Image (cartoon, rainbow, N blue to C red):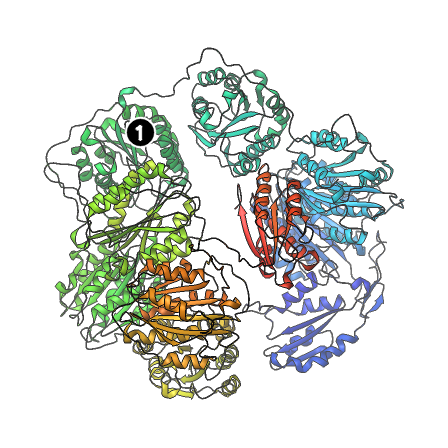
Amino acid sequence: LKVKGGRMVNTGAALNYVLGNHFTKDAGSRREEGVPQILVLLTGSKSRDNIKSPADDLKQAAIKTFGVGAKYADTAQLMEIASDPSLVFKVKEFSSLPEIDSQLLTPLSTIVMVPIVPTVPSTTTVAPTIAPTVAVPTVVPEEVDRKDIVFLIDGSANTGNVNFIHVREFIIKLIAKLDIGRNGVQVGLAQYSDGVKTECYLNSYSTKSQLVNHLKGLKVKGGRTVKTGAALDYILGNHFTKDAGSRKDEGVPQILVLLTGAKSVDLVRSPATALKRAAVMIFAIGARKADPAQLSVIANDPSLVFRVKDFNSLPQLQQQVWATLSTLPPSQPTTEQPIVTSKQVLPKVLGKKDIVFLIDASDNVRNADFRHVRDFIAWILGNLGLGRDGVQVGLVQYSNYAETEFYLNTYSSEDEIVSHMQGLRQRGGMPLNTGAALDYVLTNHFSRSSGSRKNDGVPQILVLIMAGRSRDYPRHSADALKRAAVTVVVVGTRDTDPAQVKEIASQPSLSHNVEEFRSLPNVQDQLLVSLSTLPAARETTHQQPTVPIRPAGANKRDIVFLIDGSDNVGPTNVQFVREFLTSIIENLDIGSDTVQIGLVQYSNYAETEFYLNTYSSEDEIMSHVEGLRLRGGTTLSTGAALDYVLRNHFTKSSGSRKGTGVPQLLILITAGRSRDHIKPSADALKQAAITIFAIRTGNADPEQITEAASDPSLVFSVTEFRSLPHVLERVMTPLATLTVTQVPTEIPTVPSKQVLPDEENKRDIVFLIDGSNSIGQTDFSFIRDFLASIIQNLNIGSDGIQVGLVQYSTYADTEFYLNSYLSKAEMLSHIRGLRLKGGTRINTGAALDYVYRYHFINSAGSRKQNGVPQILVILTGGRSNDDIKPPADTMKRAAIMNIAIGVRNADSVQLEGIAVDPSLVFSSNTFSSLPNIEEELTTLLLTLPALRAIPEPTAPTKQVIPDASKRDIMFLIDGSNNVGNTNDQFVRDFLTSIIENLDIGRDSAQVGLVQYSNYAETEFYLNTYSSEDELLSHVKGLRLRGGTSLNTGAALQYVLQYHLTPSAGSRKEEGVPQVLVVITAGRSGDDITRPADALIQANVFTVVITAKNADPLELQEMLIDPGLVFSVQEFSSLPDVQEQLMISLSTLAAPTVIHKKPTVITEKHTDKITEVLSSTDSRRDIVFLIDESDFVGNSNLPPVRELISAIIERLDIGSDRVRVGLVLYGNKAETEFYLNTYSKKDEILSVLRSLTFQGGRTLNTGKALEFVLRYHFTRSSGSRREDGVPQFLVLITGGRSGDDVKRAADALKQSNVITLTVGSGSADPAQLEEIASKPNLGFSVRDFYSLPSLQEQVIGSFERTHALETPTKKPALYVEEAMIDNTRAVKRDIVFLIDGTSGMGRSFIQVRDFLMKVIQELDVGPDKDQVAVVQYSSHPSFEFGLDRHSTRDAVLNAIRNLRLRKGRLLNTGAALEFVTRNVFIPAAGSRRDAGAAQILVLITAGRSRDNVGQGAEAVRQAGIVPIAIGAKSADTSEMQLITSDPDSVFKLTSFQELQSIQQQLLSKVQPVPATEEPIIYTEVVAKEMSERDVVFLIDGSDNIGNANLPHVRDFMIRIIQYLAIGRDKVQVGLAQYSDVAETEFYLNTYSTEAEVLSHIKTLSLRGGTTANTGSALDFAMKYYFTTAAGSRIKENVPQFLLLITGGRSSDNVEDAANALKRAAVMAFAIGVRNADPAQLEEMAIDPSLVFSVDEFQSLPDVLNQLVMPLTMLSVPTVIEESTIVEEEMVTTPKARKRDIVFLIDGSPGMGKSFSLVREFLLKVIEEFDVGPNTDQVAVVQYSSDARLEFGLNVHSTKDELLNAIPKLKLKTGRPLNTGAALEFVTRNVFIPAAGSRRDAGAAQILVLITAGRSKDNVGRGAEAVRQAGIVPIAIGAKSAD
């Protein structure tokens, strides 16, 4: 139980809720059985709402109420609520509740109920049913006039807002005269139009005031049509029910008052009759256009019909209606057949019968209807003689697929079945596949294993209840049931097709139809008679009793569906198309050797969904079809689409088997008239022996459709898409029976759709499209279609037409270059995925300049130098905000032909200025009219000749950088004495003016502020304030901190480190410009060069404002643009530079290329641009990581090599410039060369020319990324990361990684490695996006031969992308937040610094309680946690020190005695300095020198009066971790300044919320180690860390040196503290080495932790310049891992060697390392500084046991990763031969017990692959040592449910197993429930009763083999497997997720 939370206490509402929702029969109340009803209220506050009425209601309902109050509970309220004053109890605090236990228990255990018969009110007549005897207390309520009245009011547009007021007032005045209450009149209300909306139920309100208040707020519902019939039906099912408050069972009159103003468009008689049958009295009030005839039909009596001309005349009826209501007797049920009949005395169904109920649970059935179905079945069950020797019952629900509720043999008693039925829930879903459900029942229920007794002659009966037309083909399935001697009884209701009902039923007399679900009781007697008298059916023998699910003859077919994807179909109809396709596919035998399916959709052009050979299983096709989305489009080119299908689908490469005589079929589904001619294309298809079916709907042209179809009989028409199922059978018959069409002897010519002449071949066309907000999503789709339609008519290719695309608004973005795509399909695919860019401004001038500079150039694909015409087509919808003339003129002089298209608000003058000629300007009023200019534009594009360039030189226009609202702006202001108090007002005013001119907000401009002098101090972060008012309020209170010295460099570093980060609010990663505004008045006392460079590298735009003595020249070096320095003489002149600053702030663009020199166009214009990195920014470290697996293969090596070579050709290679490394990977990664291997371009290119790929089926990209980070981006491998050189990784891959990539990718990002990804083939876009540092650094190509086209983009990324933000501390690989295990002693010194001012007040008690709860969680002791407490106000006061209390109890006692100091001023800064200097020191008990963590927890209630900056800095310098908790008036920005980490700040509304952060605080001060185990390819056995031998081998040479020895010593000590040292537990040995090895102590030297630690603390290094690691490993093997030295290797105790080295070994390490591996010694290799990564990997037993850090002080960073395998790994295999340990699981020669269960997917998705799985099992079991004391094997198959094939203890020999496996048959069944199957094996197979030997120490192993995605949740099942200690292995293929 967790506290709910919330500020207000509404006890009245809560009492009301309990009465209505808990003291009810449905909720478990047994009041009717005489069980006492008791409510115990516990509260700690006074209620804010009215409690009297609900309290009275509880008393009237005979509920005994106890009131228990604590703290602030109101005694008077408790007395009012309690049933009796003696039942009120009050305690001071909740902790005192146990004191009243006995007082409370006595009355609780003695209360009894007195049975009485309630009095029937005098105004009522005899109720239709006898009220049951109810046990209630002796208080008898007064007799009152009780009625249940529901108002149903017309809320349609016919009523309208004005008339609705009259209706509302009419009802309110009626209610005013009624005695509203739980025991009086209850009122419900609903309004309706085309639908119904409940306003309140009968039991919603128990007082008149509540009800009237609700009515006064009532608003008209709205809606055009009035469906009164449906509304009446709704009221009966939802309002006149017990759950909704109806008291009909108590004899209370049920009244409905209908008010309507229009004629109903649906039938009203049937629902009105149903209401009357249910004894509801109906008043009908009509106004305006209400139909008198309908009102008469609805009302019970003509006297209950009332008419007025208009709603404003309703008051005239007030008295009349009231008089009738007040005198009305309860309505008697009509003499017609009632809805609930008395139970007839019918004989129970005797004898043996097997009855399965199959019920429609689709969306056709509403929730209320499903209850009727449940009750109907329950009634029937009550009349059956249930039992194993009598009637057995099964139950199945279905919609789109069937699902078993229970089988015939699941339950043997009526109670069990009834209990299941009561909990039955409708599964829902669409569409309805009755045929498939019938198949399912026959296969899965009428079988011996499911309980069927058919073989014993017991009648087999199926009762089908359905509510809609089946979408599939049920007749075949029904016939199969009949042939299998199953009698089918069908009950149809609502939308069922009567013909289908009769078709399915075994005989006409067994088909029943009812209009509504509530009428089901009308047929229950007939049904029961049928069930009683049916004899056992006889099985027909003239046919095989099989289920012919597939139509006969449909064995081999190639079928392509061509579907209209245009707006003629639209999103509302796509579901009908999907369902129709699914229905056809379900009735075909899908497979590569049977029926193949292809799918194409089209509008103005065609697009392939999948080819004939894309999918080979029904599940795969269904999955694709179910996710189908229509592409849209306004025009329809059916002819072109038919032509596309012939050329691209009915071909051998696409899977067509026409050459082998397989029939070729095309099914066209269209809804509109084609704009092109379809006859030539249709004729070509027919001549190619393809049979065309044509299905038309909507506006399709009948003539065109007839023209398309192969025969008039193959034309099918429906009026609307929802009617497609009506033609299903007509389509299926010819589809299944048609044979191969004869191909004419003369092969026809397929009409070409190419409209282009041959000689137009070459054109370079760039489209520049307006992507601003003014276009909008709707119109952008027209632009997309327009572009696609034009490109469809162009001959795309490198020797034909090349196209580029740019979108623009405020600034321009490239979609693709001229050379990006060489095929039309790729280009169209990109365009179809085009999304509106967005942006508030339209800067056409800047966009033209962008296209000119970056698209019409050689590197972007322009062929201008070859004389190819250069064409720009600009399409815009608005006027440009910038000047278009200079860039337009430049383009004309460069011989670029500009064509301008303007729509809507485009400026015609601007368009003419852009176009090269006025005749090339096109205008359109709307975007939907763009197709009108398509033909003319296409002609121009194909016929315009190339222009001649104008020779005079022209300087390029200055790029206009647009305004944008998003900015992150940091102000860094000089707070020193250089400014002084006289000038601080000018600074404040200046900041205020700037902020007032910015659009402040989370999605616009964010502002942060820091002031500095000798050190920097945060005023507020970027994310501290989100509104202008908050910012201005802080700025107005700004005070300068003073100081004599000025350290601008340190301040710049501070801003970069603590403010321009995501946690502080920076949105740099979202592309938001980062701006720093420095205001300074003096010369810096420190160096600003390095921090200034870091700011530039981080793409921070710095603007500097200097005054007084500041040196402008000094500050220019921190600027990207020297023009961003503004100088004033005095601060009073700051307003003079305000306008210039605002222009800079509004025009600086998002981070772009910073060091790139601008391209200068000389006199002779050329597109050739030298793209060499500038000398100041030429250094780069680039590692290429290349996939060499079979996903790429040697066939694709040439383009990969070409891309890398082309990039290297362009780079400035050199040891002091660009360095390159290369790694290849598949299953594992291998280095080709490091960053420092080659320093010349020729050497690298030579290696690339001889490059070959090794291949391999496995791809582990995650491991490869980790390998590169560990072994390449290190100083020893040539990385210059520490020197600030940008680090790049380029990943090129062709497949999906088989391992996790996220952790390694995150580690690369944390290490500032910028990762580019290039994917092709089967590469996973989601994985690539996860790996890439930014989304724009991910590139994809369709095939590898397109790789060279990415050259410019990759090189551009090297130029644009700079080193990322440098973290304050270099993160170690995969080290998560330090987590401390509470079970082990870990030293922590925790100081609580508490605000003791009067501002804390009574909250001090809450703080004290909070401290006690936190301390309860700490492990207090001299060698564990120590606690100190300091209170402070104007000065600090020591409560107790760290070494004062050594036990938890002592600390808790001291906390209890704390009292508030009640000072006035709050000086937090002074308090921080006090605890740093006086508490966190050894003299006061601090154990910092002994490695104890130093933690400060500040709890404050106000803003400090002094400066906290200096104190916060002192805390940081002392290595103390600060956490700040604030409430009341505490200042968030001040707390953030203290912690330097926003995540360590907890800002609360009040201290009452302290409990809510307790766990968060504990996680900060008390973390737990990461539990993720490294991947070790040795057998891991979960066992206690009881025995292991661990030898430390440390490098004692000068590689470590005495300066670093303390770090090594501490590291070993921390490891040993994790180990349980002892003779029978963990033994430790230690050796060190340099040129020779030397023993420190052996494994058996010491037997206690204290002795080991004592030796290590006194350790000194032997020194030496040489490190012979190989001979040291040999020394350890010979002298440590021996019995004499204490090793227990012969006793099978795990042996570990931990090597710590700081340099490369001078000798060979391979032989010694292999000897250790062969001896089963698990070696860990820890490398520091200059250690060789390759050598480390060679020495470690597994690459995952290699750990690298840059410096010795970083050794603790790998502690968590190292300790887990050290404490968890067990004995690996001893390798007898001299072989290398492979990454495979190896088993020990010694026999081990294993229980292995194979859990196999038995669904249809597995299909023919099941035989492959069987063969696989046979081969695996061949390798097992099967026997009672060795390996045991079980097999389980599953689909919707699991089936045990054989258990663990069934087969005791290998031969028995090998005989059993071939007998396995595919289970079949849908859906696939993997989660349920996992739970099944855990509970039923891995148990001793089923043969599991877990208790005897046998390993429990589960091997899952699956072919699909689970339909249920696998989480719970997976958790059950883990909890049971089972090791799971999962193998998936096909659609497995």
Q: Quadrant for residue 1176, please give it.
A: bottom left
Q: Nearer the viewer, residue 707 or 1255?
A: 1255
Residue drawn at x 42%, y 58% is 1742
Q: Residue furthest top?
A: 745
Residue type (three-letter) at the residue carrying disc 1: Gly
Total numbered circles: 1
Q: Nearer the viewer, residue 874 or 766?
A: 766
Residue that numbered label 1 is attached to: 797
Q: Quadrant for residue 777, please give it.
A: top left
Residue 1813 location in percent, x, y?
58, 42
Residue 1622 location in percent, x, y?
50, 77
Q: Nearer the viewer, residue 1649 or 634?
A: 1649
Q: Nearer the viewer, residue 1003 or 531?
A: 531
Q: Quadrant of the N terminus?
A: bottom right
Picture layout, residue 492 above or below residue 1597: above
Local packing at callout 1 (Cα closer than 10 Å; few below 14, some 14-19, many 20+) is: some
Residue 752 location in percent, x, y?
38, 19
Residue drawn at x 84%, y 53% is 129
Residue 136 location in percent, x, y?
80, 67
Tell me: 211 left or right of 1035: right
Helix or strand or loop: what does disc 1 sit on?
Answer: loop
Q: Is residue 1373 visible?
A: no
Tell me: 1121 left or right of 1804: left
Q: Is residue 651 visible?
A: yes
